[in-house]
Amino acid sequence: MQIRGLFHIHTTYSWDGKVTLDKLASLCRKERYKFIVITEHAESINDKVMENFIQKCESLSTGDVIIIPGLEFICNEIHIIALGIRGHFSQHKDVEDLINAIHNNGGIAILAHVSYYKEIPYEKLKNIDGIEVWNVRYDGRYAPSIKALRVLRKFKSLNNRIVAYGGLDLHNEHEFGKLSIVMEINDNKQIDYDTILNLLKTGNFKVTNNLIVINFNNISALSLMPIVILRLIHTPLHLTKKIVVKIFKIIQQISNLR
């Protein structure tokens, strides 16, 4: 059985979110999405709000949609998504300490929107669990950027077990559904919080914008051909050869790291 879900979502629990959690849950039921990964801004959350946030996610999680609560921390201008945590904890001044705190809380630490940064402190992120390679807000909905693929290549060279994600970075209702995560689940297996979180943690999913489907965690030159095509469509003619060479070189290097 194949199910779809949405990753990297902000609601009105975040200071800049414009859509309520109830509305998102309703939209997911209508469009038959089976899970939502919420990533509220941590600076908008205190202990009491976190407790209410988790309870709200649990109350809205029914047999037809699972809502996974998470936070997005900002530490020295680096954005870290924390999934699987069950409580709030204070901000950290050092990104390594933040990642350790997420792990100590039983969570998954993910570097958000890799195209956003001018520089990435790879050494400080050596214990990160995953990276958001495709972010609609910063890369667009048609394909991940060449810059993001380069970052994926670098992280894979440091830690081949790192998991790559694709997310919406949704703040408004009109951004709904432009990019989703697709999972295969045994027909006899129950769709619940633990099942979804485990598949996210292990990278057993694909990312789709309803035009192309990509498995960033089992990459090959052939599987990323759609990226080449869609990037060429949005590239001036005189630059197409250079873009093709760059993309294929990066894809080949990532493939060799498997």
Image (spheres, helix red, strand yellow):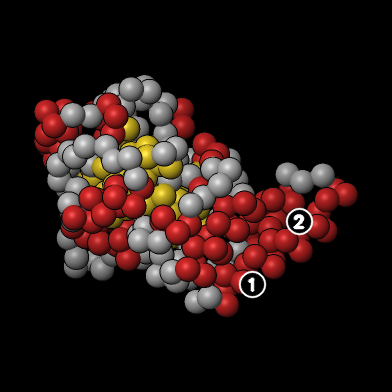
Q: Which residue is mark 2?
A: 243
Q: Position of residue 84 (x, y in %)?
A: 22, 51
Counting from the top left corner in percent of width and height, residue 163 is at 40, 62
Q: Residue furthest front?
A: 93
Residue at the location (41% across, 39% down)? Answer: 76
Q: Which residue is mark 1?
A: 252
- CA gap, disc 2 and disc 1: 14 Å
Neighbor class of circle 2 (other Cα within 10 Å; few <14, some 14-19, many 20+) is: some
In the shown orientation, is residue 176 left or right of residue 231?
left
Which picture quadrant has residue 124?
bottom left
Disc number placed over residue 185 in the picture, else none: none
Q: In the drawing, does residue 62 fall left or right of residue 172? A: left
Q: Secondary structure at mark 1?
A: helix
Q: What residue do we see at 69% from left, 66% from top? A: 248
For the residue pair 150 and 97, the one nearer the viewer reads as 97
Residue depicted at 57% across the width and 77% down the height: 256
Q: Tell whether label 1 touches label 2 (CB within 8 Å).
A: no
Q: Is residue 113 left or right of residue 256?
A: left
**Disc 2 residue type?**
Ile
Q: Position of residue 253 (x, y in %)?
A: 62, 72
Q: How many marks?
A: 2
Q: Earlier in the sequence, mark 2 or mark 1?
A: 2
Quick one: SS at disc 2? helix
Instruction: Please state which amino acid type lies under the numbered disc 1.
Output: Gln
For label 1, the crowd category at 10 Å Cα-Cα, with few meaning under 14, some 14 to 19 and many 20 or more, is some
Q: Quadrant of the N terminus?
A: bottom left
Identify which residue is drawn at 42% across, 26% down.
172
Q: Nearer the viewer, residue 45 or 176?
A: 45
